[in-house]
Amino acid sequence: MKIKLYIFFLLFSTFVFAQQKRVTTSVDSTKVKIGAQINLTLKTTVDTLSKVIFPEGNLFGGLEVLESYPTDTIKEDFKYHLIKKYGLTQWDSGVYVLPRMEIKINDKAHFSDSLLLEFVPVVVDTLKQHMYDIKDIADADGTGGYWWLYLLGILVVGGLTYLIYYFIKKNQKPKEEEVVFATPIEKATAHLKKLEQQHLIERGEVKIYYSELTDIARTYIEETIDIPAMESTTAELIDSFKKAIIRKKLSLTEDTISNLEKVLKQADLVKFAKSKPLEFEIAEDRTKIEKTIFKIHQSLPDIVEEEDEFDDSKSIQERLAKKKRKQKIVLASFVSVFLLFAVFIFFVATKGIDFVKDSIIGHPTKELLNGEWVTSEYGDPPIRIETPKVLERMDASNLIPAEAKSRIKQMNMFGYGSMTDQFYTMVMTTSFKDTVAIDLEKVLEGNLKTWETMGAQNILVKQEVYNTPGVVQGLKAYGTFTMLDPIKKKSNKLYYVIVLFKQNNGLQQIVVSKLEEDEIASEIIDRIINSIELGKAL
C-alpha cells in the first residue's frame, strides 16, 4: 500500500482543483541568501467570539524560527481579521519545504499551504580569496600484506589470557570440596560435628548456632521421613512428624517428639524473641537433637542392601567426575569467549567498527551490492535500468483520479522495498493519449508534497539538470528527509535521489532512497542512476 501511494506523483496542476481556504499563506520571498530572513504571514477571518490558536515552535520543518511576532487584529463589523507573522531562515543552501501547519479555530483544525523556499549560497570572489595548492598524496597505511601480524597478535593475546587465568587459579586458596554423603545420617552427623568446630557459642553467636542446629534436624527429617520440614513452622512440623510416625509405623516415643519440639521452640525464642539460654541449656539442646536424629535413624526400616551401597559409592564417583568435566567445559568456554572478544576488539582498533560491522557481522545493503544484479526494461516509455533485485509490478490503477483516467493511455509502476527500509527503489512510467504539457518542476513539487502527506518531514531539496547517455535531458533532485519507522517506532534520516524525464507524451520517473549514514547503499544508488537508458513511447 505504501508503494501505491506514489500514484499521486501524477497530480499536476491540471488535476488539482482550487479550494477556498480558511487560512491564507504568503511569504515576502521564496528565494534568498542563506541566513537571510523570510517573513511568513498567516491570515484568517473569524467572528468576534472565535478562538484561534496559531502554531508555535523553534522549527517549522527544516526552517529555523527567528521570531514569532504578536498577532495583529483588525476589526471589521462583526468580524476580526487576524494576521500572524513569523521570521524564518536557514543556514544551509538548498530548497526546503515549509510544511503545512495546523491552525485551530474553535478547536477545529485548519491547515496552511506548504511552500518551497530556496536558500542560495553567498558567491565567493575567487580573485581576492587566497587559494592554496593541493596537498601531496599521503602514503597509504600498508597493512594488507602483514596478515600474519594480526594472527600473531591474536595468539599472543590468547596465550597471555590463559597464563593469567592459570596463575590466578593456582594462587587461589583451594576451595573446600563438596562432600557427597551416602546416607542422610552420615550427612547429619558430619554437619553436627562441623557446627561444633565453628565455636559459635564461644563467639556469642547463639542465634546463628540455633538456626544451623535446627536446620540440620529439619533437613534430616525432610530427607528421611519425606515431610516439608524446612518451610514448616514448629507447630506444623510437629503435627506432620506425628502423622508420619503413625503412617510409616516408626517406633518413636513421646519423649523423642517432646525433646524435638522443645528444641525447636527454644530456637524460635532465640531467633525471634532475643532469648539467651545458658551454656548448659545450649549443650542439652544439642544433645537432644543428636539423640532425636539417632533414634529416628534406628526406627527406620533397614532396606539398604550391600549392592545398593556399592551403587551409591559408584554414583558418588560418577557425580564427582561429572563435576570435574563441567569445570573443564566452563574453563574452555571462558577462554573461547575471551578470545572472540579479543579478536573483536583487535579488529575494531585496527580496522574500525564499520569494517567489523560490514565484513564480519554482515550488512544487508552490502549483500545487495555484491549480489547478482539484474538489467531489465520497465514500463512505457521504457526505462532500461540495472538493479540489485528485480522490481515487482505494482497495481495502482484503482488509485488514478477519475478525471485523469480519460487522459492516461498507460501507467506502470515497479518497486523494491519501501521508504522506511534501508534501501528502496521505484520506477514509474506514464504515457498520455493526447499532447500534455509536462512541467518537471511541478512533478517534483507534487512528489515532495506526496511524501509530506506520507509522514516525511524536514525535506531538503537540491536539483540540477541531468542528461542520459542518449542525451535526453531531465531533472535530477536529491537531498534528505526524516520519516518515522512504523515498526521500530523511531525516526530515520534518509537520503534520496529523484530523476525525471519527459518525452513527447510520456513521463518517466526513477526514485531511490537509503539511510543517510549507509555508505554502501550510496554505491548502489550511483550504479543504478548511471545505468539509466531511456526508450521512446510506443
Image (cartoon, rainbow, N blue to C red):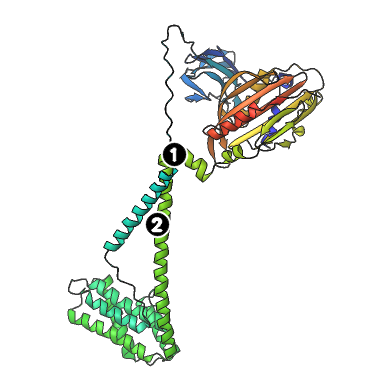
Secondary structure of the residue carrying numbered label 2: helix
Decide if residue 147 is on the left or right side of residue 43: left
Q: Is residue 21 visible?
A: no
Image height of 440 relative to 328, above or below = above
* Figure disc tally: 2
Position of residue 283 relative to residue 385, above or below, is: below
| Residue drawn where x is 57% and y is 31% of the image | 523
Labelled pair 1, 2 in contact (Cβ < 8 Å): no
Q: Quadrant of residue 176?
A: bottom left
Q: Which of the image's four quarters has the C terminus?
A: top right
In this rendering, position of residue 352 left or right of residue 14: left
Q: Going 67% across and 32% down the picture, which residue do you hit?
A: 386
Residue 313: x and y, percent? Answer: 40, 82
Mark 1 and mark 2: span between their CA atoms?
Answer: 24 Å
Question: Is the residue 172 above or below the residue 1 in the image?
Answer: below
Task: Check disc 2: other Cα within 10 Å, few if <14, some if 14-19, many if 20+.
Answer: some
Amino acid tagged 1? Lys
Instruction: Locate residue 419, reporting x and y percent.
Output: 61, 34
Q: Secondary structure at mark 1?
A: helix
Q: Along the polypeptide, which appears first: circle 1 or circle 2?
A: 2
Between 404 and 429, the one nearer to me in the picture: 429
Q: Which mark is residue 15?
A: none
The amino acid pointed to by label 2 is Val
Residue that numbered label 2 is attached to: 335
- Residue 502 visible here: yes
Q: Is residue 243 left or right of residue 76?
A: left
Q: Is residue 151 above or below residue 2?
A: below
Q: Which residue has dot 1 on it?
A: 351
**Residue 141's spot in the image, x, y percent?**
42, 33
